[in-house]
Image (tube, rainbow, N blue to C red):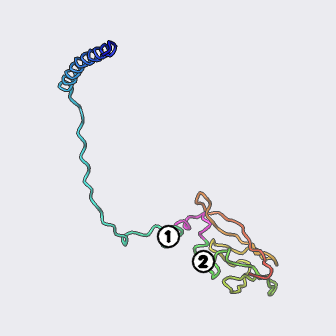
C-alpha cells in the first residue's frame, strides 16, 4: 500500500477515536440534564359538559314572518310623527296588492271634469283618480296628466327611517 493511503487511514482512525470520547461526554451530559430538569406543564382544564337542547320550531316566531313584520309596522305607526300612522289606519285598496313596476299607464279619460288614468295590471284595466292608492309602498296618486301619473310613496331609507319619495308612471303607447 502506498504511504499516503496508510497515512490517511491512520488520520481517519484518530479522528473517529477523538469523536467517540466526545460522544461519551455528550451522552453523560444529556443523562445529567434529564435527571435535573423537571418539566412544568400545567394540566389541561377538563372540557365543559355539553348539554344538548331540543329544537322546537313551533315555540318561536319565524324571524321573516309577515306576522312579525306587521307587528313592527304597527308599533312604528303609533309614534306621533310617523308617516305610517295615517296609512296603517285606512283600508287597503285593490291596486296596493301589486308592485308599481307591474303597472302600465295605457291612457287617460276625463269624467265630470276630473281626469282618470287607465292602468293595466295583469291584463285588467283599472281607472285611477287623484287620491287613490296603488303599489306596495303606500303610493298615493297626487297628480294625473294625459301622459303621467305622479305618486307619493312612503319607503324606508338606509337608516331605517320612513321617508316620502316621488315616483311616476309614464304613458306607454300601444300598451304592453
Q: Is residue 88 left or right of residue 148?
A: left
Q: Which residue is mark 1?
A: 71
Badge 1 local density, few (<14 within 10 Å), some, or many (20+)?
few
Marks 1, 2: nearer the viewer:
1
Identify which residue is drawn at 64% across, 72% down.
Answer: 138
Corner quadrant of residue 11: top left
Viewer-nearest residue: 85 or 172: 172
Q: Is residue 50 left or right of residue 149?
A: left
| Quadrant of the drawing holding the C terminus | bottom right
Residue 126 x/y as whole percent: 70, 85
User: Left or right of 30: which side holds 149?
Assistant: right
State the residue position of label 2. 90
Quadrant of residue 62 in the image?
bottom left
82 part of magenta stretch: yes
Q: Which residues are magenta?
A: 74-85
Q: Is residue 102 left or right of residue 10?
A: right
Q: Is residue 11 magenta?
A: no
Asked if 86 appears above or below 111 in the picture, the reply is above
Q: Residue at x 60, y 68 (%)?
A: 84
Total marks shown come to 2
Return the x and y of residue 3 as percentages of the image width and height.
32, 12
SS assignment at label 1? helix
Mark earlier in primary sequence (1, 2): 1
Quarter residue 32 falls in: top left
Q: Relative to residue 50, is residue 144 depicted above or below?
A: below
Q: Residue at x 72, y 72 (%)?
A: 151
Crowding at dot 2, Cα within 10 Å, few <14 / some 14-19 / many 20+, comes out as few
Image x and y of residue 137, in percent: 63, 71
Q: Secondary structure at mark 2?
A: loop
Amino acid at each position: 500500500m502506498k504511504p499516503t493511503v496508510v497515512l490517511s487511514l491512520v488520520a481517519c482512525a484518530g479522528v473517529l477515536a477523538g469523536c467517540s470520547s466526545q460522544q461519551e461526554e455528550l451522552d453523560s451530559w444529556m443523562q445529567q440534564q434529564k435527571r435535573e430538569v423537571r418539566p412544568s406543564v400545567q394540566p389541561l382544564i377538563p372540557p365543559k359538559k355539553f348539554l344538548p337542547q331540543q329544537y322546537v320550531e313551533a315555540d318561536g316566531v319565524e324571524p321573516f314572518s309577515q306576522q312579525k313584520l306587521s307587528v313592527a309596522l304597527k308599533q312604528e305607526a303609533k309614534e306621533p310623527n310617523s308617516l305610517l300612522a295615517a296609512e296603517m289606519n285606512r283600508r287597503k285598496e285593490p291596486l296596493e296588492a301589486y308592485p308599481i313596476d307591474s303597472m302600465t299607464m295605457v291612457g287617460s279619460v276625463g269624467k265630470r271634469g276630473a281626469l282618470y288614468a287607465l292602468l293595466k295590471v295583469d291584463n285588467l284595466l283599472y281607472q285611477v283618480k287623484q287620491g287613490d292608492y296603488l303599489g306596495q309602498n303606500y303610493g298615493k296618486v297626487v297628480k294625473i296628466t294625459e301622459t303621467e301619473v305622479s305618486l307619493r310613496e312612503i319607503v324606508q331609507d338606509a337608516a331605517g327611517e320612513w321617508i316620502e319619495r316621488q315616483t311616476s308612471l309614464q304613458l306607454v303607447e300601444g300598451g304592453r
